Image (cartoon, rainbow, N blue to C red):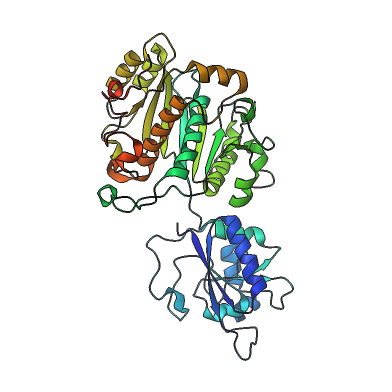
Amino acid sequence: MTNFVTLFCLEDESAWRERLRRLAALAGVSPEFRESPVPPRDIGATEGLASVRSGGSSASAAGGGLELGGDYPPPPPNWVPPAGGLGTDWFGGSPGTTSESLALTSPRAAASAPRGAVVVSLAGDGIEAGLVLPQDEAQVLNLLTSQGEEGLLVGVHGLAAGVNSTLVAALLAGAMSEVFEESPRGDWDDEFAFGTPVAPGDRGVCLVDFTGSTLPLSSYLAPVSGNNCDWRDLVSPGLPAPARLAGGLPRWGEVAVLSGSGFLERHQRPQAEAVLRGLRRAFSLVIVDFGSGKSLVDCPEAAEVWVGHSERASVLAWEDLPLPLGPQTAREVNIHLVCQPFGGLSAYQAGLAMELAHLDYPVFYPGKHPKDEKLWQREGIVWPPTKRTHAEYLQWAKELWNDLNCDEKQSIFPASYFGFPAISPYAPGRERETGLVAS
């Protein structure tokens, strides 16, 4: 995704420029303005605009009402630009140039815009052509949203019934919100700079409940500010623009939260998938608590986090889980296992059995912290927790974010940033060296 849109207008079209700037902000894309000087005799029409005024029947039929400068076909409603960047002569607007990114133009600047630029006009401005604002605002927002970068989705799954995946998902979301604030931006020493570092971004983290619970997330988290919202509230009458969506959800600290609405019915899955796609447009990272088992929605997961207890049922479920073999860098989905210190087995016994079942996957061993557990049962899950729990989850969040953003396990953080050697403390066989085995 290019994450920007080019807007063509004349220097004196301040109202058009301000309206499109606000819409671009709502869609989460950066506007890049190309302003042309006002011609000595502004006739308000161009040769390319003639077909727009005359109706452009072929363009309207192809694009569902989108009318463009010239007689070139419009992009389809779900248009995505091709990869590969922009050509050197893209901004020329001369015959033969093409656009590989979305371009919008005012009617008066249509002559200087490239082929395929979408004409957008303001109602009552004298020239109404193409998409007219404000009545066509939804269509303009859809076009702008197609240029926005999509965030990553991490699914949290329970290995067996009764595993508290919500606790792990919430603490991971809180830790990730801190990772976003603390991550270096590439100004560290060259010995740690493996190519171009990937900055987490500033759109934040969203926690979503798809466990089947009918209770709002505010029943588990404390404190939550804002009115409760579940995913069904977002599909009627339709998903808002990303900026409105991100700003309208309740907050648990720095994390936006979206509650569930009971178990998903089959006919509800397309709506739930649309909500997750909208959330990925609005946030840099979406963490979805799916409860026990695999996800029922068809949405690509950048990482799967499997949560188990130190018990026989979790060990057997992990052994039976069909997982791809080979190095993790060769797989499209990163997979992490969390072995919580609850159950009849010691954390070391359960973790060792799980490591032997799938040698390629890292295992995270959170400790047993009675002070935190009492607080969570009495008041709800809070972030940040006590010092040791905070440190454990923050280290794991950095490791997971590193896996999501880098090829060949190359860290976007220097090793000294983690406070431990470059080799991951969660690799098999290192759990005793790091002291992260529950006693």
Residue 313 rendering spot, x and y as whole percentages: 41, 13
Examine the rendered structure and indicate whether residue 284 appears above or below residue 333: below
Q: Residue drawn at (60%, 51%), measured in percent from left and top?
A: 243
The mark tally for this picture is 0
Q: Is residue 322 visible?
A: no
Q: Farthest right residue?
A: 124
Residue 325 rendering spot, x and y as whole percentages: 28, 31
Left or right: residue 371 compared with residue 402: right
Q: Farthest top residue?
A: 344
- Near-viewer residue (127 or 179): 179
Residue 428 rendering spot, x and y as whole percentages: 27, 25
Residue 115 rendering spot, x and y as whole percentages: 49, 74
Q: Is residue 289 visible?
A: yes
Q: Quadrant of residue 9?
A: bottom right
Q: Quadrant of the C terminus?
A: top left
Q: Quadrant of the N terminus?
A: bottom left
Examine the rendered structure and indicate whether residue 160 appears above or below residue 178: above
Q: Residue drawn at (60%, 64%), measured in percent from left and top?
A: 21
Left or right: residue 390 compared with residue 210: left
Q: Farthest bottom residue?
A: 40
Examine the rendered structure and indicate whether residue 302 appears above or below residue 39: above
Q: Residue drawn at (66%, 61%), measured in percent from left and top?
A: 137
